[in-house]
Amino acid sequence: MLADTPAELASLPLIYRGKVRDVYGIDDQHILMVASDRLSAFDVVLPTGIPGKGATLTTISNFWFARLRHIIRNHLDLATVTLEQALPDPAERARVAGRAVVARKLRGLPIEAIVRGYIIGSGWKDYQQTGSICGIALPSGLKLADKLPAPIFTPSTKAAVGDHDENVSFETVMAKIGEELAAQVRAVSIRLYQEAAAYALTRGIIIADTKFEFGLDEHGELVLMDEALTPDSSRFWPADQYRAGVNPPSFDKQFVRDYLETLDWNKKAPGPLLPEEILEKSAAKYREAMTRLTAS
């Protein structure tokens, strides 16, 4: 299927289209976030989407927001407008059913708050070159996909659509948002990761790493926003197939990344069309991750 277009909600203005989410204005304090079926890989939005992905991401995010709200408030907790109030027309609500949430409007921080519990991806590449990630020195002799002695906070810049995120040091984050707020973001991110990873392991999933986004409310208080611990913002590995030294199979879009690595593609837009087999397998992996995590 081709990556979907904005939901074209006639009653609300489209104010932003991200790699995956469309954001609509509701009022001065609220926005409507709609998760699409679009897929971003290597910071390129691919022309084919994953069927049902938007609803799956929304279900997983909402699960984590509820489960982890004792650690930090999230943008859903602060909303005082319901979906029915935001979209009173039943036909419009049906258009975004299962993949839309009303969220509080926040002042987003200009960083990606990444936590790594295992060494993989760009972190592995940095480690091979420098023995460290984002300026954090790591033990020598680590293998691909090894579990780290403790989770580490490895922030990156927040790139615009089509641009590439860049790993940065904690000192850079302090310079951008201030020392006290940077320390709070790091501490909260690591705690969120630790609690989520411990729970996921009981469901047979290793969360290798994840990305959080934060904003500030009108009082300058930190709030978790965007999405939380989804297959798009994390690497999920099946615990029973994990083995250090090899790139583990995954429940997330790493499956698509691995396929794309086999192609003669320069990782710049436009991305290649994905074959039906890859789309179906990817959709099944997203659904399995959702079921494992959220089933009672």
Image (spheres, rainbow, N blue to C red):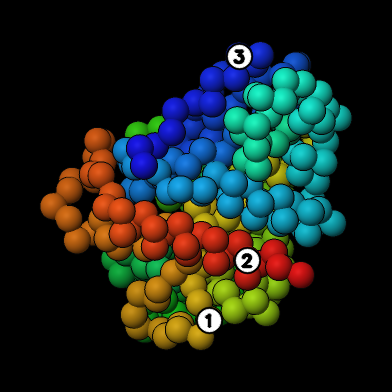
- Give the residue type at disc 2: Thr
Q: Earlier in the sequence, mark 1 or mark 3?
A: 3
Q: Which mark is residue 150?
A: none
Q: Tell me what residue is drawn at x 26 percent, y 52 percent.
A: 275
Q: Which mark is residue 10?
A: 3
Whether residue 218 is visible here, answered yes or no, is: no
Which one is closest to the eye, mark 1 or mark 3? 3
Element at label 2: helix
Dot 2 surroundings within 10 Å: few (below 14), some, or many (20 or more)? Answer: some
Above or below: residue 277 compared with residue 7: below
Name which quarter of the figure residue 224 lies in: top right
Element at label 1: helix
Is 207 situated left or right of 280 in this image?
right
- Give the residue type at disc 3: Ala
Label 2, label 1: how far apart the Cα atoms are: 15 Å
Which one is closest to the eye, mark 2 or mark 1? 2
Label 2, label 3: how far apart the Cα atoms are: 33 Å
Residue that numbered label 2 is attached to: 291
Q: Position of residue 100 (x, y in %)?
A: 65, 36
Residue that numbered label 1 is attached to: 239
Question: In the depicted view, which residue is nearer to us: 37 or 45?
Answer: 37
User: Marks 1 and 2: in contact by CB < 8 Å?
Assistant: no
Residue furthest toward the front? 91
Question: In the depicted view, which residue is nearer to us: 206 or 93?
Answer: 93
- Give the residue type at disc 1: Ala
Q: Tell me what residue is drawn at x 57 percent, y 74 percent.
A: 205
